[in-house]
C-alpha cells in the first residue's frame, strides 16, 4: 500500500510507525498482546521495521525473530525510493528507536521539554550516524487581537469534554513505560495552555494576533532548534487560510 501511495503521489508518502500504548483500544478487539507490551513495544517495532525495509529493498525476506517468522515472504510492488519513516516516540526507548530507524520525529511536549528532547535526539542520532528531522506539534489560534484569541482559548477549555479526558487519562495511567506520551497527557491535566493543557489533548497552544503568533513561532524555533512545526486548528479551513495569509508571509525563518 505504501509503495502504491508513494508512486501515485510522485514521492510524497511517508510511513508513521506507531507502537500503540492505549490498552483499551486494542483490548476491545482482542488484540492486546499483554501488559509486557508497554515495555517491549519498541523492540517489536524495531523487528517490524527491519522486515519492512528488507521487503521494500528486495521484494522478499526470510526472517526468524522473536515476534515475526517469515519464510521467503514476497511483497510487491517495491517502492522506487527509500520511504521515509516517521515516529512520535518520546520516552527514552522511543527516542532511541527514532534515532535508530526514523527519518523524522514529531513531538508533543512543552517548549521547555522540547529543548531537552531535541538535544537528546540529536545526540542519539549522531551516535547512530543518522540525521533525524524534528517537528513539534502545536495548536494554533489566530485572532484580530491577543484578547480575542485568549477568549477563544478560554471557551475551548470551558467546553472541554470531561468524559473523554477522563477516559484518555485512565488509559494513560496504565502505561508503565515512563517518560513518553502517557506521562505528557497525565501532566497536561494541570498545565497551562502554553505548555499543553488537557483541553487541547496536551498539545501546547500558540495564540494571539498574527504578529504575536509570528513572534512566538520564531522564538520557539530559535530556542529549541526544531526543524519544523505541525499545526492543528479549532476550525481547520478558516485557521489554515488565516495562517497562510497573515502568519506565513511574515515569518523570517
Image: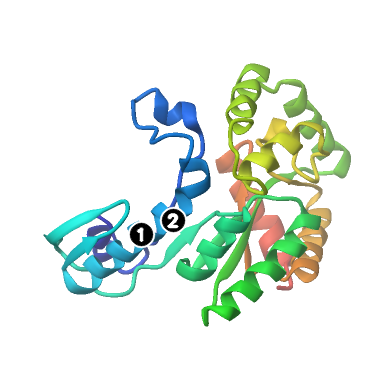
Tell me what residue is drawn at x 17 percent, y 65 percent.
62
Counting from the top left corner in percent of width and height, residue 14 is at 39, 61
Query: In the figure, residue 148 lies in which quadrant?
Result: top right
**Rounded to the nearest whole Å, what is the CA distance between mark 1 and mark 2?**
6 Å
Q: On the image, numbered disc 2 is attached to which residue?
A: 43
Visible residue check, residue 248? yes
Q: Does residue 36 lie above or below 66 as drawn?
A: above
Counting from the top left corner in percent of width and height, residue 123 is at 65, 75
Tell me what residue is drawn at x 51 percent, y 62 percent.
97
Tell me what residue is drawn at x 81 percent, y 38 percent.
191
1 and 2 marks in contact (CB < 8 Å) = yes
Is residue 166 rendered to the left or right of residue 103? right
Visible residue check, residue 202? no
Quadrant location of the C terminus in the rendered image: bottom right
**In the rendering, which numbered label is found on residue 245?**
none
SS of the residue under disc 1? helix
Counting from the top left corner in percent of width and height, residue 160 is at 69, 23
Is residue 180 rendered to the left or right of residue 28? right
Q: Does residue 178 lie above or below 105 as drawn?
A: above
Quadrant location of the N terminus in the rendered image: bottom left
Q: In the image shown, does 57 or 1 lie closer to the viewer? A: 57
> Would you call the spot at circle 2 few (<14 residues within 10 Å), some (14-19), or many (20 or more)?
some
Amino acid at each position: 500500500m505504501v509503495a502504491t501511495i508513494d508512486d501515485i503521489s510522485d514521492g510524497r508518502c511517508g510511513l508513521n510507525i506507531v507502537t500503540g500504548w492505549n490498552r483499551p483500544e486494542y483490548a476491545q478487539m482482542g488484540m492486546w498482546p499483554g501488559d509486557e507490551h508497554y515495555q517491549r513495544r519498541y523492540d517489536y517495532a524495531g523487528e517490524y521495521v527491519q522486515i519492512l525495509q528488507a521487503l521494500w529493498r528486495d521484494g522478499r525476506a526470510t526472517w526468524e525473530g522473536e515476534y515475526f517468522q517469515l519464510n521467503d515472504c514476497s511483497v510487491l510492488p517495491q517502492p522506487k525510493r527509500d520511504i521515509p519513516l516517521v515516529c512520535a516516540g518520546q520516552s527514552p526507548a522511543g527516542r532511541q528507536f527514532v534515532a535508530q530507524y526514523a527519518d523524522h520525529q514529531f513531538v508533543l511536549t512543552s517548549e521547555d521539554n522540547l529543548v531537552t528532547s531535541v538535544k537528546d535526539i540529536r545526540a542519539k542520532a549522531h551516535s547512530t550516524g543518522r540525521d533525524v528531522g524534528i517537528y513539534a506539534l502545536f495548536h494554533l489560534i489566530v485572532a484580530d487581537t491577543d484578547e480575542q484569541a485568549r477568549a477563544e482559548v478560554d471557551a475551548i477549555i470551558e467546553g472541554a469534554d470531561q468524559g473523554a479526558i477522563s477516559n484518555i487519562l485512565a488509559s494513560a495511567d496504565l502505561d508503565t513505560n515512563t517518560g513518553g506520551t502517557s506521562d505528557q497527557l497525565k501532566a497536561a491535566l494541570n498545565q497551562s495552555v502554553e505548555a499543553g493543557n488537557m483541553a487541547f489533548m496536551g498539545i501546547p497552544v500558540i495564540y494571539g494576533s498574527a504578529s504575536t503568533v509570528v513572534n512566538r513561532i520564531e522564538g520557539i524555533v530559535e530556542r529549541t532548534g526544531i526543524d519544523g512545526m505541525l499545526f492543528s486548528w479549532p476550525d481547520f479551513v478558516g485557521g489554515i487560510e488565516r495562517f497562510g495569509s497573515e502568519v506565513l508571509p511574515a515569518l523570517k525563518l
